[in-house]
Image: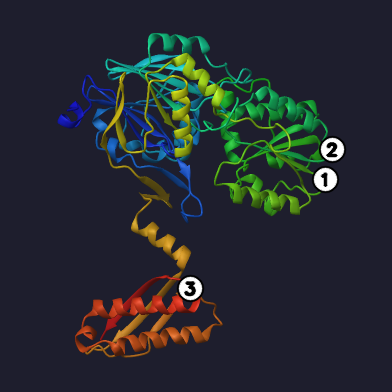
Amino acid sequence: MSEYHKTGKPGKDELLFLPLGGSGEIGMNLNLYGHNGKWLMVDYGITFGDVTTPGIDVIFPDPTFIEDRADDLVGLVLTHAHEDHLGAVPYLWDCFDCPIYATPFTAAILRKKLEESQFVGDANIIEVPLSGRFEAGPFELELVSLTHSIPEPNALIIRTEAGSVMHTGDWKLDPDPLLGPTADEERLIQAGKDGITAMVCDSTNALVPGRSGSEADVRENLVDIVSKIKGGVAIACFASNVARLESAAVAASKSGRAVCLVGRSLWRMTEAAKATGYLQGMPPFLEAEEARDLPKEKVLYICTGSQGEPRAALARIARGDHRDVSFKKGDTVIFSSREIPGNEISINRVQNGLVENGVTLITADDYEIHTSGHPNKDELAQMYQWIRPDVAIPVHGELRHMMGHAQLAKNCQVPHGIVPRNGALIKITKDGADVIDEVPNGRLALDGNRITPLDSISLRDRRKMGWGGMIFATVVVDAKGRLYEAPKISVEGLLEDHEEDEFAELTDTVELTVKRLDRDERLNDKKVSEAVRIALRRQINDICGKKPKAQVHLVRI
């Protein structure tokens, strides 16, 4: 029997892995490693709400399992500064209060986010240099530089007495990333020679053949495209892709344009980049208000909103309600990004709004103006050749990505593999990996100014109201259960004001339902309310084919 099963804590001879977010999905990364009575957290990120979560902007993994074991949590290591890897920290970090380990750029981004969130308390952020080594409880850790679409992405080598893990985080193999070093191939090869029990690895592009491409090629193409545009020009990209910001600035400089940043997150990223030694030698960027009076042909705008986010700069520009920036016929918007699955409708809405205003669009379907930050098949195969783990554990992907990744690892002669799911507690040994327990897991949502489970009653009711509408009835009865006055009916999201006949039908339905109840039922408030509720839902379904949430307020006098 596992030591964990005897004591509830990982044993001295055990190396455990527990994903609570990011397995079977892209985003919301939260991974735990257990050894010798202690736990280590790697990343704590968010994802964003969509049409299925009305009123919800931010969603993150439920950390209850490790919150209940906070005294045994020795630290959080952040692999890089993307929202899906650190975005949840400002919301729930006071539940843990352990050291946070991050490289300088990631630490700068986190400090800014904590400041903006008015985080209560002092987070203990420990900066670790690139390629740095440190200890956290029984875990010995080493950072290994990789390349990605943000500065300072790191793989982690996690060493314990029970084995070693290579946790890759998000990565690719870019031979010319333009910002920061290339992947530390020498260190990766040596790690493989030293022996790695398991590799927990990014699966995002595991189904995509070839290699992901280089930022250097993107820069060359952006320079060429911008140089040929005569009117106004904007580039929409991810704010976190600092190399892409630099590429856009280079394209602007070579075309005699000043750079204007439009979007708060762009300013946050550039401030953190400059504070940690990146974007040096760049001319000062302009605020939108400063660029307003300059000729359009003298400005290159870099905008947030490449994924169609309704409150981002580009969506506001497309709607024509941005105070300082407008695009029209003769202007060009370059989407230097690929759509994240699920964002297609939002992106199309923004692009159609721009086209309606006469704007010319250029996307990655037209030219090579974007490269992914994740490894394609050939890069994954290269990593397996270097690391040569005993066990492959794909994460950071939907199930189809992870299954494809597992097959690729098998083709690369990795002897063992397991495809995890959130909540599966996995014991790792050189002879394989097995699920030894299933722990509670779920999702939390930021609902206004409070945090609530994503499957809470309030959010379930909101979804029901969003899809089916709402009907309210106030029914007044006397002591014998007879109607005292005509019921009052209110309908939300189902009928129009002029549909008086339908409202009359609902009133008649309530009156008839109460009259049909026998004497004992009319004296029972719960039975009267339930009978009316069911009858109203049936009647609305007959009228308009919807099954709304119905609520009955029964008054007995």
Q: Position of residue 496 (x, y in %)?
A: 54, 77
Helix, strand or loop at mark 1:
loop
Q: Which callout, 1 or 3, points at the residue further toward the start of the chain? A: 1
* Position of 230 relative to 532 (above/below): above
Q: Which mark is residue 230?
A: 2
Q: Is residue 78 visible?
A: yes
Residue contact at pointers 1 and 2, CB within 8 angstroms: yes
Q: Nearer the viewer, residue 85 or 415?
A: 415
Helix, strand or loop at mark 2:
loop
Position of residue 114 in the picture relative to residue 213 (left or right): left
Q: Which mark is residue 545?
A: 3
Report crowding for label 3: few under 14, some 14 to 19, many 20 or more residues within 10 A (C-alpha): few
Name the residue at 30% across, 30% down. Answer: 426
Q: Nearer the viewer, residue 496 or 165?
A: 165
Q: CA distance from mark 2 to mark 3?
A: 54 Å
Q: Which callout, 1 or 2, points at the residue further toward the start of the chain? A: 2
Q: Position of residue 251 (x, y in %)?
A: 75, 28
Name the residue beneath numbered marker 1. Answer: 330
Name the residue at 45% across, 21% down. Answer: 155
Report crowding for label 1: few under 14, some 14 to 19, many 20 or more residues within 10 A (C-alpha): some
Q: Position of residue 309 (x, y in %)?
A: 58, 47
Residue type at mark 3 is: Gly
